[in-house]
Amino acid sequence: MTGSICMHGMLPCSAPYARTLSPALQRSQCYPLVNPQFLRGVATKGRSTARARRVQVCAALSVAASSPWRVWACLTCAGAAGLWSEKTKWGKELSGPLVSTLAGLVLSNLGLISPNAVEYSIVNKYLLTMAVPLLLLSADLRRVFKDTGRLLVAFMIGSVATVAGTLVAMKLLPLTDMGVDGWKVASALMARHIGGAVNYVGVAETLSITPSAQAAGLAADSLICAFYFAGIFKLASSIGPDDASTTKGADASRAGANSKPHQETGGIQVLEGATAVGLACLICQFGSLGAKGLGLPGAVIPVVTGITVALATIVPGVLKPLVPSAEGIAAILMQIFFAAVGAAGSIQIVMRTAPSLFLFSTIQISIHLAITLGVGKLFGFQRRDLLLASNANVGGPTTAAGMAAAKGWKSSIVPSLLVGTLGYAIATFLAVGLGSSVLQHM
């Protein structure tokens, strides 16, 4: 039959259309090619098939991106990349935490891992919390007050200067474009510039800052800190190293065998590392119970901090052998955390909020440095001590000790480490308290 198609073994036409045909055509089941419903059905079926295939492909990619081992592989590799980057010139400028954060951000926004993976909550709730006591096992407050001398007073001036800088920056730039995260990020940055990165993330978790806001704050602050470190080294360019008499004087008895930062005294030892991890888990358990007992289930990290500092002050001799291994393990856990922060973030949100955070951090650190140098000079402090104290505030104990070693200020290496460790111990409490009571209402 010309102009018709035999439907035997193929899709039949619709019943209404078949009833319009002659009885002979109905018996033969051969229908004209001009059947409009048949043609539309074929086209619709083709589009549906293609759409279904696309959905299947997307579903397969989504399942692969959410694969637990893929997520853990990406997080650990991003963390390792951050640690490796600090051995390079560009990595030192950006900092390992920022490199790991950016790596996680890129991996998730390219679709290689899911931005909503359950593994991120595991990192935030358990690995981060465990890293805090591991970092604070050397926080012996008695030694801090005994061995730091005027550097401790300079550090406290710098801490007050950070608070003042945060208040002024918040007044001039209240971060309203970040919504409820605005005052929280300001609090986290205040903790960052009194203690260090561990305090930034501790406040971020305590106040429940969104991952994108955490990543934006870290990215902006890391860039500003790079300029800050270049600036304080420039200010210290005219200050020479310790001479022989100074090195052999009273401070030498404190520097002695411990003149190198404790991060460099040895690698991770199996027994000490395992013991440190076990102790950290016990502290976290008691910290969790304590936070619930206080009616503050979200304040686990501050409670854990308090318990660890108390132990480090009461039994420093017992904990001392664990310190190098504990800090090595903590460094790994922190880098994984930074990678998770980036992976859970959005590049669009980071790019939108980062400019205001750049300006906020610039104002905050500029006022901190100006007040520290100005007030310190007024009270007769040496510029060297003021710069080291400021470095301990903004960068933490390792950057302050690194500056002292690089400049040949050997008698100041251990005191710089100690005051920086004090910053770790107090910054989270100060930032959460001032943030909730003051910054939130500005």
Image (cartoon, grey):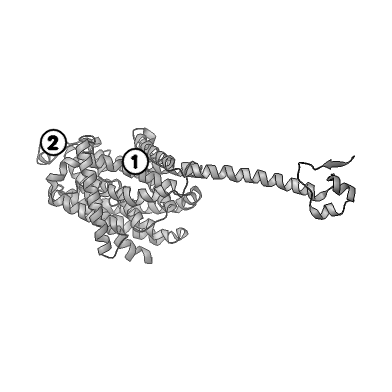
In which quarter of the view is residue 255 placed? top left
Q: Is residue 9 left or right of residue 134?
A: right
| Number of numbered discs visible in the structure rendering | 2
Q: Secondary structure at mark 2?
A: helix
Mark positioned earlier in the residue sequence (1 or 2)? 1
In which quarter of the view is residue 249 placed? top left
Task: Please provide percent x and percent y for residue 224.
Answer: 38, 46
| Location of residue 405 with respect to 436 vertically, above or below | above
- Crowd around label 1: few <14 · some 14–19 · many ≥20 (10 Å): few
Mark 1 vs 2: CB contact within 8 A:
no
Q: Please, what is the three-letter code of the amino acid marked with disc 2?
A: Ala
Q: Which labelled disc corresponds to residue 165?
A: none
Q: Please, what is the three-letter code of the amino acid marked with disc 1?
A: Ala
Task: Please provide percent x and percent y for residue 131.
Answer: 28, 47
Viewer-nearest residue: 325 or 203: 325
Toward the front, the furthest residue is: 27
Q: Is residue 168 visible?
A: yes
Q: Secondary structure at mark 1?
A: helix
Label 1, label 2: how far apart the Cα atoms are = 30 Å
Residue hosting label 1: 230
Viewer-nearest residue: 196 or 275: 275
Q: Is residue 345 left or right of residue 124?
A: right
- Crowd around label 2: few <14 · some 14–19 · many ≥20 (10 Å): few
Image quadrant occupied by the C terminus: bottom left
Q: Is residue 218 left or right of residue 177?
A: left
Residue hosting label 2: 257
User: Which residue is at 15% across, 35% downward?
Assistant: 243
Q: Is residue 225 visible?
A: no
| Location of residue 64 with respect to 296 vertically, above or below | above
User: Which residue is at 44% across, 51% downward?
Assistant: 212
Q: Of tags 1 and 2, which is closer to the observer?
A: 2
Task: Please provide percent x and percent y for residue 246.
Answer: 13, 38
